[in-house]
Image: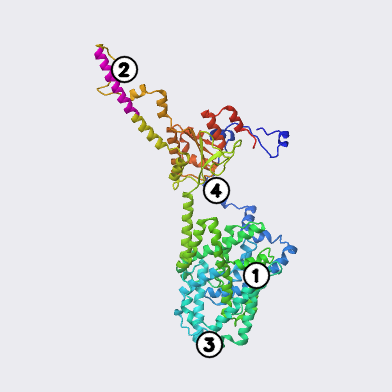
Amino acid sequence: MEHAGENEICHRSDPVYCVERRLYNQGTLQEKLHKKKKTYLPLRQRIANSCSCSSKKAKTILYSFFPILTWLPNYPVKEYLSGDIISGLSTGVMQLPQGLAYALLAAVPPVFGLYSSFYPVFLYTFFGTSRHISIGTFAVISLMIGGVAVREAPDEMFYITSINSTNSTNLDNIKARDDMRVTVAVAVTLLSGVIQSLIAVFSNITKTNIAALVVGLICMVLLLTGKEINDRFKKKLPVPIPMEIIVVVIGTGVSAGMNLSKTYGINIVGDIPTGLRPPKVPDISLLPKVFVDAIAIALVGFSMTISMAKIFALKHGYKVDGNQELVALGICNSVGSFFHTFTVTCSMSRSLVQEGTGGKTQVAGTLSSIMVFLVLVAIGYLFEPLPQAVLAAIVMVNLKGMFKQFADIPHFWKISKIELAIWIVAFLSSVLLGLDYGLLTSIAFAVITIVYRTQSPQYRILGQIPGTDIYCDVEEYEEVKECPGIKIFQANASLYFANSELYTSALKKKTGVDPCAILLARKKAQKRHAKELKHERKKKTVLKMTNEMENSVKHEVMSDDLPINGKFSVAGAAAQDSSPEELERFVMPETNIHTIILDFSPVNFADSVGVKALRSIIKEYEEIGISVYIAGCNGSIVDNLTRLNFFEKATFRDLLFPSIHDAVLTSQLKGSVVSQGPLDAAICSPTP
């Protein structure tokens, strides 16, 4: 390898490189590289190695299962602690009202929202890999849980007269209903269940409690105002205004002072028992009923968590482990189900607050869970007069961000119509069919779009940037020129059963050379030419016989052109009477192309059907005198072709080249299309 001289480089404005090497195909390259032989251990040895445990391996497993061990021992107290404390307090202030509010969506008493805001959040600190997301109750998941709870434990199962009645029997029925719903919610949490039904709001519009409506609207105005102030002055405010906890405190005080429950019949939170409930094994008998629902909630919860975790990891320069996140969520929900929690996942709003207020690690999450714990064991009873309308207002305002996703429609319209179609199908199917069937429908549609994309790849003809070994789309760039007599074909997809026919058709269309059509046209021309020769031969024979009779000359003609068994040998006549130019017209295709190069650099895999199509392409073009080369195969593709017996024919290995340029130069040398001078320039020439 020779590089441009130092003086030559100094006189040029742009860096250049000049490489002189021999041309390689796959066979000669493998001989030079001396590929390493892979050694496969016996199954018994592999099992033994997997089961063996060293101190290093045990430490690695321990650190991967408990990510907290990787950062807590080296926790920089001076740098991180103040930010984590502020972030933890800010997140905890949001965690309290949201836990109470989202419990209503889950159709369980509010205290269970506090349980769900304590146990899983504390557990995630030890098992999670993200440093910034806030685990806990989430509106969509809570709504899905509530649908299952109401389905399995509807109000009709219990005799309930009024939610604010003090009748002991009625209270017992309410307690039985709540216990039943909590049991269902816990069972769903164990499997992460999903909601199917929708909330019929307008059907009960006439039963609206005006006082509750007014309270809810006032709270919504206050919350929206607070969020607007936080968004507009977030750079000037040291921490966001905790408007949610302010509204909860004010609402609780006003409700207790004015006795809104008895005076206006406003539903309140009610009994919040002090302390923690003892653990209880979930009702296993409910699991078959909610199994299908569990799968959907598990997918929704995990997708929400991992997406937010990756966003923050990318922003702050660390990595999250998707598998460990799944394990962490599974532990949080499974262990939490024994302590009366419902399904939790990452909350967008709390995560943004936790990260935006300076949180650096999950110490902030631990502090927020401790705040919830203090409420549970000490001051939970103070929130008993809190109107449920206040919690409903918190839910509605927090859902506002989700409705903003409608603004993504113009964005998707500009960047990808397929992604817009996925968005619309997911939205409509979730609204019309419910979240469970909507999720399945949207996933199925997304898979269909993937199949469509793989079956509809982009096909290009590449050309060379003059004086370089760079090849680009000839239709996209004006300076790119096709190599004379060579067509370079590229498809940005793998070659397998679903698109092998499309690949072959696109190759013929893009190159303008269809072997089948050329062969068919040649056969027709040969037949037509044979008929013409036969007709002319008959004329010559008649004329010859006439001349012989006139001259009375008898002689015997010993020739292959005479009739054999009373018939003329047309093939022999055609071969003898045809000039070399005529024969070449039928032997050579009606095109000046002598080589087609298939660029396999975008190809990731090929199956048996794709390899069969590749063999067929090579064979068909060989029949019309066109060579087919394959360039840019990565190692896995070469191994794949070897396993599929593509190289049964030894010469096929010589058709593979490590780069397009190797294939082009080999074709030019073999076909003697260009002189030696231009070839040297193509092999080694500076960038213009």
- For badge 4, the amino acid type reads Arg
2 or 3: mark nearer the eye = 2
Q: Would residue 153 appear left or right of 20 to someone viewing this image?
A: left
The three-letter code of the residue at mark 2 reads Ser
Relative placement, left or right, of 456 versus 559 is: right
Residue, x 65% and y 53% (percent of image)? 56
Mark closer to the chain start, 1 or 4: 4
Image coords of residue 427 (percent x, y): 49, 64
Question: Cα distance, mark 1 to mark 4?
Answer: 48 Å
Instruction: Say which residue label 1 marks.
Output: 91
Q: Quadrant of residue 565?
A: top left
**Residue 526, percent from left and from top:** 36, 30
User: Which segment is the magenta one?
Assistant: 529-550
Residue at numbered disc 2 = 559
| Residue bearing the label numbered 4 | 46
Q: Earlier in the sequence, mark 3 or mark 1?
A: 1
Say which element carries label 1.
helix
Q: Secondary structure at mark 2?
A: loop
Which residue is situated farthest in the right direction here?
Answer: 78
Specify whether residue 2 is painted magenta.
Answer: no
Distance between mark 4 and mark 3 Cα atoms: 68 Å
Q: Earlier in the sequence, mark 4 or mark 3?
A: 4
